[in-house]
Image (cartoon, rainbow, N blue to C red):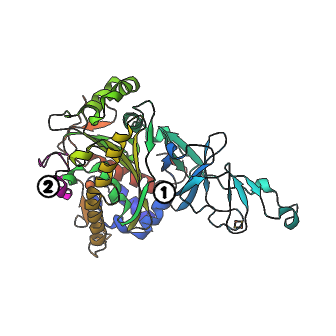
């Protein structure tokens, strides 16, 4: 029984050692769907994607097709995208604007509030037993937003989104709440399928700047990243947050940045200074890259990488949606401050496309490595389930030689380098805690 095996693993858990069989095991995958994706807050989209009443977008929330709508009262609602009649997918477009959704199968119609408002020849064909008010679309049990970021949760009894995000909110405020107009998603999210396990992609962004100097070597050679110093992604702080979240606040080797506020233009600085606290401004003025993750599978990077022409700040958020132990669907949202000039946005968008868009150089480097992790983890020796030290992978970096930096101005447990596995170990612990948690038990 997988549950017993995981309980045994928990009892014998040794920090820094992660059994490789956990990466691709199909029973682990099934249990993750129930214990992790069925219980935690999952990112669905950004409020700027739903501008006016009648706007809708369709998304996947773990395995469930979801439709998000903006109703007449400008409230955002989220429903299972499945008709209540025979269950077919109601809406097949990615986005649009409508007064109502009509099912392609037998023509039932639903309002933007999810109510069933039209049944073809309903009066003639259905008797008294059919009460339309009982046949609306099924709502996602919980939908909440923070800084425009919309999340859903299948678990009615889950803690609130804000409580779940905890201290990550402080960093979200810097990235998303700094300017008066807020952020907007430009274009539609890029979406593609990759051979990878979601745990490995999530940890790559949240917890692993160490890979940058090697995996992305070609970016240095092509002058897309600023320096050939192999430690260049280590400077700054790795910050461990609650609930498996984490962020790397990367600076230059001096602890500063050559470009204040990530090189964003001066005409926005007074907005930043009006919206952020002194400590947030201190961090924001020195950072070159923020890169991190919200457990389980939302990651982000706020960076200025790109060629000289396109070197402008850009933020992208990405969901690694598992569609099997060895396969994920990647969705990437590019976001930018609404108050920036069109010219800046255009250059920044090109910088994003060159680096972290679906065909971006940096994205391709990582995708190749993640596929190789899958290939090698299929090996008989890697799948050996006995608890021993020759079938684990290594997360020992910084384990016993690194002191917390108590002077760091932001919340969380900050370590004075980003080349450490502190966030990865915290993600593993939270993963195991959720995987072994029984119904009704507190974490
Ligand atoms: S399945 Fe939608 S109307 Fe029949
Ligand atoms: Fe990478």
Taking 134 as reference, is 410 above or below it? above
Residue most extreme to the bottom: 380
Does residue 233 belong to the magenta stretch? yes
Taking 243 as reference, is 354 above or below it? below
Magenta stretch: give its range: 213-234
Q: Where does the image place residue 215, in percent across and percent down from the top left? A: 20, 58
Q: Where does the image place residue 240, in percent across and percent down from the top left? A: 32, 41
Q: Secondary structure at mark 1?
A: helix
Q: Where does the image place residue 336, in percent across and percent down from the top left? A: 39, 41
Label 2 neighbour load within 10 Å: few <14, some 14-19, many 20+: few
Does residue 123 belong to the magenta stretch? no
User: Does residue 301 appear anywhere in the picture?
Assistant: no
Of residues 28 and 364, the one nearer the viewer is 364
Q: Mark 2 near ligand 2 (CB under 8 Å)?
A: no
Q: Which mark is residue 221?
A: 2
Q: Secondary structure at mark 2?
A: helix
Q: Main secondary structure of the magenta part?
A: loop
* Residue at point 67%, 42% (across, down): 72
* Residue at point 66%, 50% (across, down): 112
Of residues 241 and 225, the one nearer the viewer is 225
Res 23 → quadrant: bottom left
Q: Which residue is mark 1?
A: 35
Q: Is residue 258 left or right of residue 163?
A: left
Q: Nearer the N terminus, badge 1 or badge 2?
A: 1
Q: Where does the image place residue 280, in percent across and percent down from the top left? A: 33, 29
Rounded to the nearest angstrom, the CA distance separating label 1 from label 2 is 43 Å
Q: Is residue 319 left or right of residue 363?
A: right
């Amino acid at each position: 029984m997988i549950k017993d095996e995981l309980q045994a693993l928990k009892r014998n858990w040794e920090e820094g050692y992660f059994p490789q069989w956990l990466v691709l095991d199909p029973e682990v995958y099934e249990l993750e769907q129930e214990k992790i994706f069925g219980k935690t807050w999952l990112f669905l989209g950004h409020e700027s994607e739903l501008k006016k009443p009648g706007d809708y977008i369709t998304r996947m929330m773990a395995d469930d097709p979801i439709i998000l709508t903006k109703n007449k009262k400008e409230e955002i609602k989220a429903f299972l995208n499945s008709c209540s009649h025979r269950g077919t997918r109601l809406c097949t477009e990615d986005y649009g604007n409508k007064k109502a959704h009509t099912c392609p199968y037998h023509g039932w119609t639903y309002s933007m509030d999810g109510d069933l408002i039209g049944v073809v020849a309903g009066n003639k064909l259905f008797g008294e037993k059919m009460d339309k008010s009982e046949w609306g679309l099924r709502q996602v049990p919980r939908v909440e937003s923070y800084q425009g970021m919309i999340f859903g949760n299948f678990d009615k009894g889950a803690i609130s989104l804000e409580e779940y995000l905890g201290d990550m909110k402080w960093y979200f405020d810097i990235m998303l709440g700094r300017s008066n107009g807020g952020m907007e998603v430009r274009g539609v999210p890029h979406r593609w399928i990759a051979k990878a396990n979601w745990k490995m992609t999530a940890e790559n962004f949240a917890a692993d700047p160490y890979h940058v100097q090697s995996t992305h070597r070609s970016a240095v050679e092509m002058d897309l990243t600023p320096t050939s110093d192999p430690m260049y992604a280590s400077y700054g702080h790795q910050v461990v947050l609650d609930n498996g979240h984490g962020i790397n606040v990367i600076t230059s080797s001096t602890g500063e940045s050559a470009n204040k506020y990530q090189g964003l233009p001066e005409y926005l600085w007074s907005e930043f200074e009006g919206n952020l606290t002194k400590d947030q401004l201190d961090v924001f003025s020195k950072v070159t890259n923020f890169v991190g993750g919200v457990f389980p599978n939302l990651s982000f990077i706020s960076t200025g990488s790109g060629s000289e022409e396109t070197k402008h700040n850009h933020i992208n958020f990405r969901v690694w949606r598992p569609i099997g132990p060895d396969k994920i669907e990647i969705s990437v949202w590019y976001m930018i401050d609404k108050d920036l000039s069109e010219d800046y946005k255009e250059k920044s968008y090109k910088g994003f496309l060159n680096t972290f868009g679906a065909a971006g150089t940096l994205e391709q480097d990582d995708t190749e490595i993640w596929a190789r992790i899958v290939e090698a983890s299929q090996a008989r020796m890697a799948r050996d389930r006995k608890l021993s030290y020759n079938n684990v992978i290594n997360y020992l970096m910084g384990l016993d030689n690194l002191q917390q930096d108590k002077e760091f101005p932001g919340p969380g447990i900050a370590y004075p380098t980003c080349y450490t596995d502190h966030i990865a170990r915290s993600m593993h612990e939270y993963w195991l805690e959720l995987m072994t948690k029984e119904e009704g038990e507190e974490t």
